Amino acid sequence: MSRRVVGGIAAAVLSAAAVLYAPIGIGTESPGGMAARTHVVLFVLAISAVSAWLITISPHPTSVRFLTGVSAGFNLIWMFSFAGPPVVLASVVAVLVAVVGVPRRVGLTTSLLAVLGVSCGLILLRVTEPSGEHIFG
């Protein structure tokens, strides 16, 4: 399979996840911290879908690769969700598409930005963790 086909599938999965998550993300009646978490997760998911489409269909500017790395890395926090595996897999594929066929320096930076995205996502989960929810043990 070509990089464009694989990237297109990942972008379509991320787009579908953003569309399906939008009613939850926009219409949340949760307490302040949970509402903020939900809005940030939806916003980053939408950015990830757009950047995955851009990396798939257009010439590949480095900034879009970096944005794909950070946002797709952040999306790895979906591993804690029941509905998360498709988003996690699509995000990993989006990062792989972003690092294939580029100079090593750009690929390494994109990968490191994905790790930074995961770290930011985990910090968000920890900071907005409501009482009774124990993701981290």
Image (tube, rainbow, N blue to C red):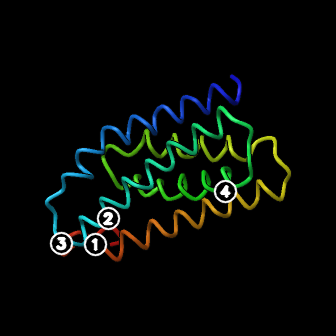
Residue linked to disc 3:
132
Q: Mark 4 or mark 2: which comes first in sequence?
A: 2
The C terminus lies in which quarter of the figure? bottom left
Q: Locate residue 96: give its quadrant.
A: top right
Q: Quick check: 96 above or below 129? A: above
Q: Percent x, y for residue 7?
A: 61, 33
Three-letter residue code for mark 4: Phe
Residue linked to disc 4:
66
Separation of marks 4 and 1 at Cα, in angstroms = 28 Å
Residue linked to disc 1:
129
Separation of marks 3 and 4 at Cα, in angstroms = 35 Å
Q: Locate residue 114: give its quadrant.
A: bottom right
Q: Quick check: 12 above or below 71? A: above
The reply to whether the C-beta atoms of the residues labelled 4 and 1 are less than 8 Å apart is no
Q: Mark 3 or mark 2: which comes first in sequence?
A: 2
**Mark 3, other Cα within 10 Å: few <14 / some 14–19 / many ≥20:** few
Element carrying mark 2: helix
Instruction: Name the residue located 60 percent from the left edge and 42 percent from the top edge.
Output: 94
Q: Mark 4 or mark 1: which comes first in sequence?
A: 4
The reply to whether the C-beta atoms of the residues labelled 3 and 2 are less than 8 Å apart is no
Work out whether residue 27 or residue 92 is closer to the camera in this orientation and state it: 27
**Mark 4, other Cα within 10 Å: few <14 / some 14–19 / many ≥20:** many
Separation of marks 1 and 2 at Cα, in angstroms = 9 Å
Three-letter residue code for mark 3: Gly
Q: Is residue 136 left or right of residue 10?
A: left
Q: Is residue 30 left or right of residue 57?
A: left
Instruction: Name the residue located 24 percent from the left edge and 66 percent from the top edge.
Output: 34
Q: Quick check: 121 above or below 126? A: above
Give the foreground label among 3 and 2: 2
Give the foreground label among 3 and 1: 1
Q: Which mark is residue 37?
A: 2
